[in-house]
Image (tube, grey):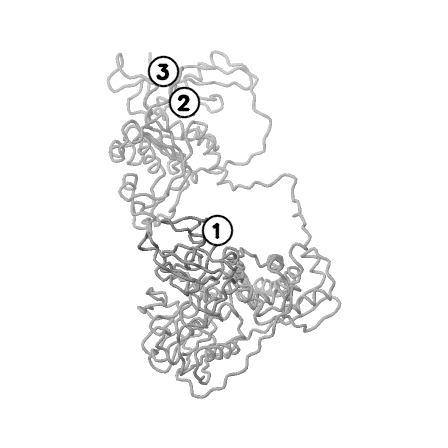
Amino acid sequence: MKFTLSWLREHLETEASLDQITTTLSAIGIEVEGVEDRAAALASFRIARVIEAVQHPNADRLRALRVDLGDGREYSVVCGAPNARTGMVGVAALPGAFIPGTGITLKVGEIRGVKSEAMMLSAREMGLGEDHSGIVDLPADAPVGTRYVDYAGLDDPVIEIKVTPNRGDALSVRGIARDLAAAGLGTLKSWEVAPVAATYPSPLHWTIEDRRACTWVLGRAVRGVTNGPSPQWLQDRLTAIGLRPINALVDVTNFFTFAYGRPLHVFDVRKVAGTTLSMRMARPGEELLALNGKTYALTEEDGVIADANGVEALGGVIGGEHSGCDETTTECFIECALFDPVRIALSGRRHDVRTDARSRFERGIDPALLPKALEAATRMIMELCGGEASEVSEAGAEPAWRRNATLRFERIAGLGGLDLPREEAERRLSALGFSTVSRDAEAITVAVPSWRNDIAGHGALAQDPSLPADRARVAAEGCAAIEPECDLVEEVLRLGGLDAVPPVSMPITSPVPRPSLTPKQARAALARRVLAARGLQDCVTYGFLAREQAALFGDTPEGLRVENPIASDLDQMRPTPVASLAMAASRNAARGFGDVALAEIGGAYRDPASGSSQLAVAAGVRAGMTGASWAAPSRAVDWLDVKGDALAVLERLGVPMAAVQVTADAPGFYHPGRSGVLRQGPKVVLATFGELHPKVRAALDIPGAAVGFEVFLDAIAEPKRRKKGVPDLPAFQPVRRDFAFLANADVSAEALLRAARNADKALIADVVLFDRYAGEKLPEGKVSLAIQATLQPRERTLTDAEIEAAGQKIVAAVAKATGAVLRG
């Protein structure tokens, strides 16, 4: 919120400087975001009179001026403004002055042979608007030589503050003045409003059809008004805080919004259909053409103000264009209402309407201010526009806002750490408008003023309906006792300055900091480190892409369509991060960088109807050739590279590798026969890997080899926490034996290895595949699979007979499981 220093002084009797005021505001919890001193940039500009204006001798569009700046000498000025004339009064700048509108520093110069010693200024050149049609034309009696900022009343700093959501009372100049006065920076001026006598019955009447739309509303008509531009002082005040003056009636409502935090609205009586204005909920199909020129399709959850023909305003948010006041208005009707803050906030968010009225209503306004504000607004309209007032029309009733709060003095030190005398605590509360109900040596009970709806209210959070009745009752009673007291402690502390509250460190619960990452976050971070160590560059890509590209990698259900995409070609949530990485590889290849290794920890999106719409995935794509090395020649990347990446992630995340199985049912964007799925049991899919399908590579224009993988982090179970015991270090040497089996070509090496491991789990420590051969000297349809089994004795050294028996178990188990036979 913005306000000028002079506006604040109308409510606060103080001798404090601007610096004292801004410092105090920040100290009492009202953050000052900035101070704009418009006079600083205009301080050197002076009012000047044009003694003579003649045609420039060497330029058709320029004029040569002789100018008096009030210092006893004449200045030669070359000016291109069409309105420059003899005798006019304007604003001039001397050499060395900085011109805000153009960003230049003025120097003495010569233009087409005529010396120019100063500059006559337009409004845009002074930074006071966009008018550049001519130089500023002031009244003939403007005092020559006087600073323009003094003459125009621009020597009035604008203060901008940031208000927390609970402090609706601070969204007004009077509310700010009240806080400053309570902090000892002056005295709050009284605001008395004499009632306006009614001279005729009200032409419009209120009715509340639904209390959800409004709880209390007052209205009053003023006839015989002349609605033109508001007086200059009001226009200047609104312009200074960033508002555009419209007309006197509308400007009055804006004035009350900022001066007293009391939004108002004015209807043109002639444009209202019928004699009744209704507070009700919107009906299906109703629309509102608002004052901002936009049309809003209303819902049954929106509270509206309606006449006989339909909706005229979105209550508490924005008025309608049809019944707005303009220069033809001769009778207006002032609306002063009380709305539900939550409903106002929801309507404003639903329709994306941000207005000054909404920002105040959704924070809560003073419920007792309505009659006084209506009288004051009526009087101001009559002073500015003339006319006579009608009787007041009313519907609903003032809500029961009166409530008390109790503060135990010892809680000031207990909660705030500040040892404050009891009398000082009572004085601070009294200065804020809290009146004492009762007091003893231990505590004080005060009546909360109407404008502080954030203290001892109903609370911002609703109870969990599933709570048992007895627990809910106890919790509600506790909140009712504790929250108001905490509110009072905060008020007492902040008025002395937040800097005066002693800093206290939080208690240390453990000498070792607790983990800051959840297990899921830690798992993702570990996977990222593993992939980086394997040479893959970490990427961050969009979670959405073009629907046609997404379709290459999976389904594109309507439930994953982006309704309002940031670009027309980013309209579908991606089925897998592999898609985004493959597109990145394609873009790199198009720029001459075909050999890439990319990884991302991101989301994969599935049809919401499946129950798990977003999956956490560690994905990678390799494209082109492997890096040059002395140990091995460079080659095209293949599916074994990414299988190794996926297995490395799984192993580092604690997956028991002996339980991992490989199947060939990889998704369709992989090459069939050059891809696979890593599983833990028949149902749990841990990862997929493989060469990208040729059709996918062609569609993405990837010229060379491209392979990818995805590890589903959510599918990996948390490793069981076991107490660490003594390491199992057998005292006996292991024995290794090699076996070569002749098996059918369709037998997977994984099945053969699993059979060999299970032959004797107590003795066999490990089994690995070290050779696969198919070709000459083997029957057609057969392959040779060579494995090495490690036998680890634990009680004694194995005899030859025991080793031979273990070998026979392995051969028998493999034959039974796969049909493979030992090669001769």
Label 2–label 1 contact, CB within 8 A = no
- Mark 2 or 1, closer to the camera: 1
Horizontal relation, residue 16 to residue 579: left or right: right
Q: Where is residue 222 drawn, in percent x and y?
A: 43, 81
Q: Secondary structure at mark 3?
A: strand
User: Would you identify the image quadrant in which residue 298 lies?
Assistant: bottom left
Can residue 1 be seen by looking at this rendering? no
The vertical placement of 287 against 748, above or below, is below
Count of number-bearing discs: 3
Q: Nearer the viewer, residue 246 or 680?
A: 246
The 10 Å Cα crowd at callout 1, few under 14, some 14 to 19, many 20 or more, is some
Can residue 77 be seen by looking at this rendering? yes
- The residue that label 1 is drawn on is 95
User: Which mark is first along the chain, 3 or 2?
Assistant: 3
**CA gap, disc 2 and disc 3:** 12 Å
Q: Secondary structure at mark 1?
A: loop
**CA gap, disc 3 and disc 1:** 98 Å
Label 2–label 3 contact, CB within 8 A = no
Amino acid on which disc 3 is placed: Ala
The quadrant of the picture occupied by the C terminus is top left
- The residue that label 2 is drawn on is 756
- The residue that label 3 is drawn on is 740
Residue under the point 67% across and 57% down? 415
Q: Where is residue 484 drawn, in percent x and y?
A: 62, 65
Amino acid on which disc 2 is placed: Ala
The vertical placement of 624 against 615, above or below, is above
Amino acid on which disc 1 is placed: Pro
Q: Nearer the viewer, residue 39 or 440?
A: 39
Q: Nearer the viewer, residue 299 or 368?
A: 368
Q: Nearer the viewer, residue 327 or 437?
A: 327
User: Which mark is first along the chain, 1 or 3?
Assistant: 1
